[in-house]
Amino acid sequence: MLLSQGLVLMVAGVSIVFLFLGLLVAVLSASAKIIPRFNHVLPDERPRARTPKCAQPREPTGDEEIAVAIAAAVAHQRNAGRVKECGRDGLLRPKR
């Protein structure tokens, strides 16, 4: 008895979800056909042309220099103790 009630509840739940999703698809499809008819009331704006901004060269600040120094120190620490070998392409690779 308990199993049959569970199955009935499951079928009812799945049916309700299926009907809701079908209704949602129908409403969205209908609105996609109806809304363009009223585009003259509130038209879309034309997209503005973007003007490219030229990158201005600037002097590095102290924070950028510190960040570069920290990155170099971390890279050196990670590669410490590894002997590197030159690959066929001429790039250094860690030995395995």
Image (spheres, rainbow, N blue to C red):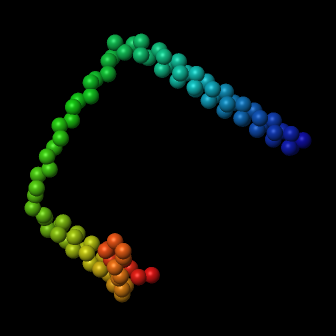
Q: How many marks?
A: 0
- The residue that appears at 11% across and 52% down in the rendered structure is 56
Instruction: Establish if 24 lies above or below 57.
Output: above
State the residue lying farthest toward the right. Answer: 1
User: Can residue 78 be spotted in the picture?
Assistant: no
Is residue 90 depicted above or below 81 in this figure? Answer: above
Residue ID at (32%, 22%):
44
- The residue under the point 27% across, 24% down is 46
Q: Nearer the viewer, residue 96 or 34?
A: 96
Residue 37 vs 22, above or below: the answer is above
The residue closer to the viewer here, 82 or 38, is 82
| 57 relative to 35 in the view: left or right | left
Residue 38, given in percent of the width and then of the height, sits at 39, 13
Q: Is residue 52 above or below residue 27?
A: below
Viewer-nearest residue: 87 or 33: 87
Quarter of image, res 73: bottom left
The answer to whether one can see residue 83 in this image is yes
For the N terminus, the image quarter is top right
Which quadrant would residue 66 be assigned to in this image? bottom left
- The quarter of the rendered structure image containing the C terminus is bottom left
Q: Which quadrant of the view contains residue 53?
A: top left
Does residue 64 appear to the left or right of 35 in the view shown?
left
Q: Position of residue 87 (x, y in %)?
A: 36, 76
> What residue sits 21% from the left and 35% below the top?
50
Task: Report whether 61 appears left or right of 93.
Answer: left
Q: Position of residue 47 (x, y in %)?
A: 27, 28
